[in-house]
Image (cartoon, coloured by chain):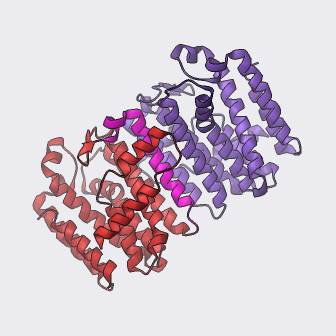
Chain colours: A red, B purple
Amino acid sequence: MMEALRERIERALESFSTDDVAPLLRESMRYSLLGGGKRIRPCLLLLVCSMLGGREEVALPFACALEMIHCYSLIHDDLPAMDDDAIRRGRPSNHVKFGEANAILAGDGLLTKAALLLAEQNGFDDAKRAILEGAYAMVSGQSDDLNLTERSAETLERIHVRKTGALFKAACVAGAYLSDPMRAEEMGAFGDTLGLLFQMTDDLLDAARDREEGKLTYVTYYGEAETAQFVQDAASRASAILKPYHGEAAETLRALIAALKSRTE
Amino acid sequence: MMEALRERIERALESFSTDDVAPLLRESMRYSLLGGGKRIRPCLLLLVCSMLGGREEVALPFACALEMIHCYSLIHDDLPAMDDDAIRRGRPSNHVKFGEANAILAGDGLLTKAALLLAEQNGFDDAKRAILEGAYAMVSGQSDDLNLTERSAETLERIHVRKTGALFKAACVAGAYLSDPMRAEEMGAFGDTLGLLFQMTDDLLDAARDREEGKLTYVTYYGEAETAQFVQDAASRASAILKPYHGEAAETLRALIAALKSRTE
């Protein structure tokens, strides 16, 4: 199911990125937006929506807006003034390919397009707000990360919850608002947990580099063994939330949890 | 009226920028958002709305979102990779004060907050879309400007229409959608004309610097005399559109046209 879902997301992202804007803006936006990626956030949104009985064609623009927000944040993150990463997904980062000024605009364009795409949908105001609140919390987390003053468990938690967790949570909350709003809180908790799982396995995978760079991550703060235990706990909590749900979407979400968990095994 | 209006806008901008986000993000967003400025775009939105019988308290969040979008674009424009301006409104630009990385995030935060503020309002979907379409067209114009390949009247027009004209038009169209949607097209034409008037008087004021930097502007392309004539023409066209309207808001808009026109006299 996941592969077919990803293909539908790719097609939708393609169709939502053909606006009549300046040629180089369109090219640079599409370069990053259509240049691969696991599409985990839009998949999550669509799977939660589908699991709760919602319609995928209604949810697709929301899922694409969320992915555009994720994509803009990567472009800006990679800039020389930020993380200064020259490679993204095995290709030159946006600013290496198009220059810094165009990369700044490509990010601005994707964030604007995401907001416009949401505004173009009828109704589902709660889902729109959930996605934009996630986007706002993400910027806040990046700022906290950038201006780190103390290395504490609280700081680590606050940065993570906002920086990575925010869009994972937004995906699941929006998926619920698009199908069964009564489940929004429960799905928010699911998104939080899954975001944590994703962040901690990421930290385990990048442990050597992060240590070298003195970054504050779950691994550099708690160590690998404890983080690995946290991963198991988070996977259990996420699975527990899914317990009452059945059907193809729920099964795919369970497979996603297993896949995330096994990234580091 | 204009002064009182500006004060209400200042108060609203202040109240909309106190979110519980990372302290430095909030500070850097507020530094640029509350650091002065003519507030011409939000004034326009509120005046058009009021002239057409709409309610200011409904329109204020929309006006503030528009000003946040304008403000984010200034922060990103001033970045070293873009125009590299160290001074904005007589104070250090955002990146000089907070560093490049924080300035990028301050711009991202303001654009996100603008979209969220719009999403938090009930109804008036057309007004929301008009503002975000303006924001998207603005990025497109900036990209065109940045990647200039030919100096033609068409290029000049396309860049201007999108770069400056887009938010002026959005202000007036949104003002109409918030009061009398049947007037949206007429007010769009008014916004276009006023944007042109603003851009051309700006170009006249910056003529010496733009010539030195080889910029493509109305003055460097058509010369000062012809641009001054265009200014008169645009002011006449804008006044003609306002002809059927009376009352305080219409009078204030007429005064605004006169003030813009007289900037270069």
- Write the residue at 50% across / 39% down: A22
Tally of numbered tags: 0
Reply above or below: B158 against A66. Answer: above
Residue A185 position within the rendered picture, expressed as x and y whole percent measured from the top left:
42, 74
Q: Nearer the viewer, residue B42 or B243?
A: B243
Q: Is residue A70 above or below residue A105?
A: below
Secondary structure character of the magenta stretch overall: helix
Depth check: B120 or B181 in front?
A: B181
Q: Does the segment drawn in magenta span residue A119?
A: yes
Task: Name which quarter of the figure residue B81 lies in.
Answer: top left
Residue A125 is situated, as x and y percent measured from the top left of the image, at: 55, 67
> Would residue B36 be seen by someone viewing this image from the given angle?
no
Residue appearing at x 51%, y 63% in the figure: A128
Q: Is residue B234 visible?
A: yes
Give the position of the N terminus of chain A as an image quadrant: bottom left
Answer left or right for A139 relative to B5: left
Stretch of the chain drawn in magenta: A93-122
Q: Is residue A104 magenta?
A: yes
Q: Is residue B135 left or right of residue A203?
A: right
